[in-house]
Amino acid sequence: MENWPRRLLLAASLLFNCVTASQTLAAETIGDSLRMEPVIQPKVPRREIEPVEIDDENFEMGAFVGFLSIEDFGTNPVYGVRLAYHVTEGIFMEAALGRSKAGDTSYENLSGDIQLLPDDDRDYTYYNLSLGYNILPGEVFLADRYAFNSQFYLIGGIGNTHFADNDEFTVNFGAGYRFLVSDWAALHLDARDHMFDSDLLGESKTTHNLEFHAGLTFFF
């Protein structure tokens, strides 16, 4: 009976070791179960996207064709060329030259034989220098494999319009959409307003000549 404290201490120590060992074994079992692979393996197909980026060259040149609504002279075909220099990723400068031919006014159509302008003076030619700013860049996905970059831009500038044997200082502004079909070519959709003062019909006023055209450009 004299050794009962020692025996009690030994029994408590054995009990503590057993409890600790069982907890360690349980933790290892839980860890192994967590590391087990799930019964259902998710299979997510990965698409390989090949984005088309703008070429490293800063110059862009091309041609366009569309329609020009010459105020008081109807809507007529327009065609021209453009040359742009990309100063930065967001800013570019553009020089453009366009040609059209004015139609008949409503007065000429109603009067019959009266003609306000001879045919030679109906040629409409403009050239301008504009500053553009790219906004709202985006991407267009086709065929689940190809991604094409696109940009919406604002543009405005000054230039000259030769019409009715007169040269008129012209201000233009508008917006456009550039769709990059490759790293060296792009499609354009543009809307512009060419404004200049004219007294051709007797009253001096600011004319608004709306242009809508589509074009193809190349980087070099």
Image (tube, rainbow, N blue to C red):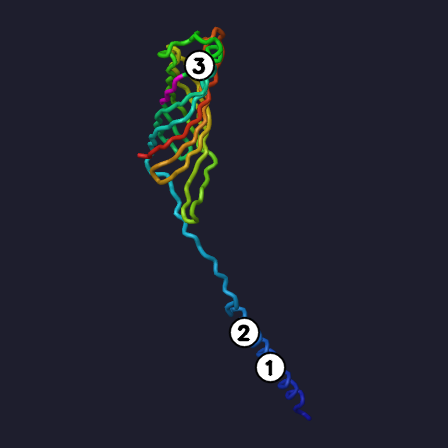
Label 1: which residue? 18
Q: Are marks 3 and 2 in contact (CB under 8 Å)?
A: no
- Residue 116 drawn at (x, y percent): 43, 8
- Does label 3 or label 2 sit earlier along the sequence? 2
**At label 1, which amino acid type do we have?**
Cys
Identify whether 14 is placed above or below 138. Answer: below
61 with respect to 205 (left or right) = left
Q: Main secondary structure of the magenta part?
A: strand
**187 or 16: nearer the eye?**
187
User: Which residue: 65% across, 91% down?
Assistant: 3
- Looking at the rendered image, the disc whose residue lies closer to the viewer, 1 or 2, is 2
Residue at image mark 2? 28
Q: Residues within 10 Å of mark 1 (few under 14, many from 20)?
A: few
Determine the CA span between mark 3 and mark 1. Answer: 107 Å
Q: Secondary structure at mark 2?
A: helix
Q: Secondary structure at mark 3?
A: loop
Q: Relative to 1, is 147 above or below?
A: above
Image location (x, y in percent) of residue 58 = 34, 33
Range drawn in magenta: 97-101
Residue at 49% x, 7% y is: 203
Residue placed most toward the observer, 1 or 145? 145
Inspect the magenta stretch and tell me whether residue 96 lies in it.
Answer: no
- Which amino acid type is shown beneath numbered disc 3? Asp
Q: For the residue marked with disc 2, what is the amino acid? A: Glu
Look at mark 3 in the image and give the residue it sits on.
104
- Which element type, helix, strand or loop, lies under badge 1? helix
Q: Please name whichever residue, 12 or 187, is drawn nearer the observer in this view of the structure.
A: 187
Q: Residues within 10 Å of mark 3 (few under 14, many from 20)?
A: some
Q: Earlier in the sequence, mark 1 or mark 2?
A: 1
Which residue is at the far right?
1
